[in-house]
Amino acid sequence: MVTKFRKIAVLTSGGDAPGMNACVRAITRSAIARGLEVIGVIGGYRGLLYNEMKVLGHNDVSNIVNLGGTFLYTDRCIEFKTEEGMQKAVKCCRDNGIDGIICIGGDGTFRGATDLSNRGIPTIGLTGSIDNDITASDYTIGFDTAMNTVCQMIDRLRDTCESHARCNVVEVMGRDCGEIALRTGIACGAAAVAIPEIPFDEAAAIAKIKELKAGGKRNFIVVVSEGLGKYSEELAKKIEAETGIETKFARLAHVVRGGNPTLRDRLTAAEMGSRAVDLLLEGKSNLVVVERNGELVTCDINYSHIVDRMYKNKLKDGDLAPFSEEDLASMKALCAYRKHEIERLYKLANDLA
Ligand code: ADP
């Protein structure tokens, strides 16, 4: 075990997600239990540029395990991305005696973590994102809470749709990832689901709604992922025009980001947070803790970036050059698995509509 570690920092960055607080708490308590000091960086990477941070003692993380948002605050800090900004951040870490940082967030946050580790500050990334959009991980902290919130909202909409014999098109968050829409669509009994990953057969969906109406069905829920842009609003108008069913539109937007984290998110946050502290103490850096088949494992942050790009067909020249044959094979297998899962769930959603 490397003993030079005395003080670690933790920050939350990018989009907030329920469970981030539970994760900061787990990091703080695990680190204190191992004899370390903990610093909470305020407002993501911006806090490292302007030296905004506070010592986190045992009691400073009391009463937050159940709270949504992030009490360390978050920010989208453009300045950090510049070489000057990064040098400032590195100097801030050195001046404060910070031996390693745990960065909770999404893909952008991990890029920042890599930049710091390349400049000599050990970093570990933890996946905090409501969207479940990190290809390398089966799960991201906040996803379960977000889906449960969507479910509750849609259940309410269904009540009123049934009373009035209406349709409601519901747009949910997810950036370019359709996971929230797809899984909540299944769980809420949606008549149709539209996500960015699979071409949406609009004519078939409208024909299905007409057929269901003819069979006596009164309420219709259609879930659309925000990754499809303004399409959700257009679709609501088309459904009304073509089926004669009064159709409302609801954008759940940031409602889905807040709220008390579910048990799943709190447990995952606890396990990932504690693992991240251990990794730093083992002298590891530039790793992200991910979940695969129900187990926590680690992968290199660069691997996580590139497998994301591979999955989204956004590979650039030379991206694959640093990786071994074995890595490339596992990346391809992971992408194929993700794609297969989305297709399987999409078919299930349609079969159950
Ligand atoms: P998320 O982590 O949820 O994907 P963002 O993409 O907004 O959210 O990234 C969060 C923060 O991480 C940014 O505000 C920025 O400070 C830092 N960041 C993002 N991209 C990079 C990059 N390419 N290099 C360095 N830092 C980055």
Image (spheres, rainbow, N blue to C red):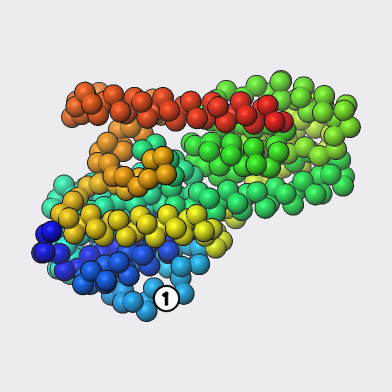
Q: Is mark 1 within 8 Å of ligand 1?
A: no
Q: Position of residue 72 (x, y in %)?
A: 38, 66
Q: Residue at position x 16%, y 69% from top?
A: 6
- Report the front residue among 28 and 80: 28
Residue 17 in view of the camera: no
Q: Residue at position x 27%, y 71% from top?
A: 33
Does residue 93 appear left or right of residue 301 in this picture?
Answer: left
Whether 31 is drawn above or below 239: the answer is below
Q: Position of residue 29 (x, y in %)?
A: 32, 70
* Residue reaching furthest to the bottom: 59
Residue 169 lies in quadrant? top right
Whether 110 is drawn above or below 244: the answer is below
Q: Residue at position x 27%, y 41% from top?
A: 299
Hey, what amino acid is under mark 1?
Ser
Q: Quadrant of the N terminus?
A: bottom left
Residue 200 lies in quadrant? top right
Q: Residue at position x 72%, y 31% from top?
A: 353
Residue 297 in view of the camera: yes
Q: Which residue is tagged 1? A: 62
Q: Position of residue 80 (x, y in %)?
A: 27, 53
